[in-house]
Image (tube, grey):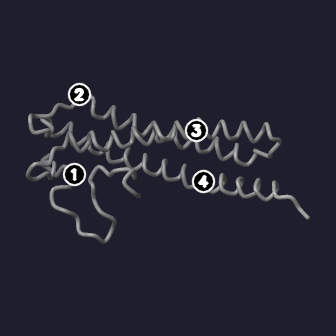
Amino acid sequence: GGPNAPQTLTDTPKKGTPEPKGTRGPDDKGNSGDKGNSNTKNRIEKVLNGQKVQLERARKVIEKTQEWIDEMKTAGKDVSEVTTAFVAFKAEIAKAQASYDAAKKSLEGLSFDANGQPTDREAWRNAYTTLKKSNGDFISSIEKAIRDFQKVVRATQQKNRASATPKP
């Protein structure tokens, strides 16, 4: 991913790369693994804000795509394949939205101290587990939606360009 790629809750690099210090989840005692000036609340908010931005972008893509499909229909183009892919795209975005909602809900009732650290370690441990799963599900849904839909859109665009080219 680039600068707009989904953030992971643990900010852990790809497999095979040593894990930086202070980025692990809660240990058996409920300690967050954070060292120094890390702020758990801020990291969670950063992840959730990143997801919110991606969902807003996805909504814009959905709006623009619907307009594009409508224009192609009006022009007499075959939109069956792209319409099917569009339905699947919207379903994956809905899954991502559900993951985002689950992550936000898991934070309800959590309180943080002045340093942004959770005050109830057991509640934090449970929330962290949900947050981590929800974040993974969110990333999976967004990536699948984009990857699968882009393939069909590109194929449709190429097909339409080829059919628009006059034949000698």
Label 1: element kind = loop
Task: State the image coordinates of residue 59 (x, y, percent, origin top left).
Answer: 52, 36
Q: Earlier in the sequence, mark 3 or mark 2?
A: 3
Q: Which residue is mark 1?
A: 25
Residue 109 tag number: 2
Q: How far apart are the alpha carbons under marks 4 and 1? A: 34 Å
Q: Earlier in the sequence, mark 4 or mark 1?
A: 1
Task: State the image coordinates of residue 145 (x, y, percent, origin top left).
Answer: 55, 49
| Among the 4 quarters of the image, the one containing residue 70 | top right
Label 2: element kind = loop
Q: How far apart are the alpha carbons under marks 1 and 2? A: 19 Å
Residue 93 tag number: none
Identify whether 118 is placed above or below 165.
above
Task: State the image coordinates of residue 7 (x, y, percent, origin top left).
Answer: 34, 50
Instruction: Give the amino acid at mark 3.
Output: Ile
Q: Tell whether label 2 touches label 4 (CB within 8 Å).
A: no
Is 14 left or right of 56, judged from the image as shown?
A: left
Q: Tell which of 50 and 107 is nearer to you.
A: 50
Is 17 left or right of 95, judged from the image as shown?
A: left
Q: How far apart are the alpha carbons under marks 4 and 2? A: 39 Å
Point 27% across, 55% down: residue: 11
Residue, far top: 109
The residue carrying pointer 1 sits among few (fewer than 14), some (14 to 19) or many (20 or more) residues within 10 Å by Cα, namely some
Q: Tell which of 129 and 89 is nearer to you.
A: 89
Q: Which residue is mark 4?
A: 150
Is 12 left or right of 34, judged from the image as shown?
A: right
| Among the 4 quarters of the image, the one containing residue 119 | top left
Q: Nearer the viewer, mark 4 or mark 1?
A: 4
Q: Which residue is mark 3?
A: 62
The residue carrying pointer 2 sits among few (fewer than 14), some (14 to 19) or many (20 or more) residues within 10 Å by Cα, namely few
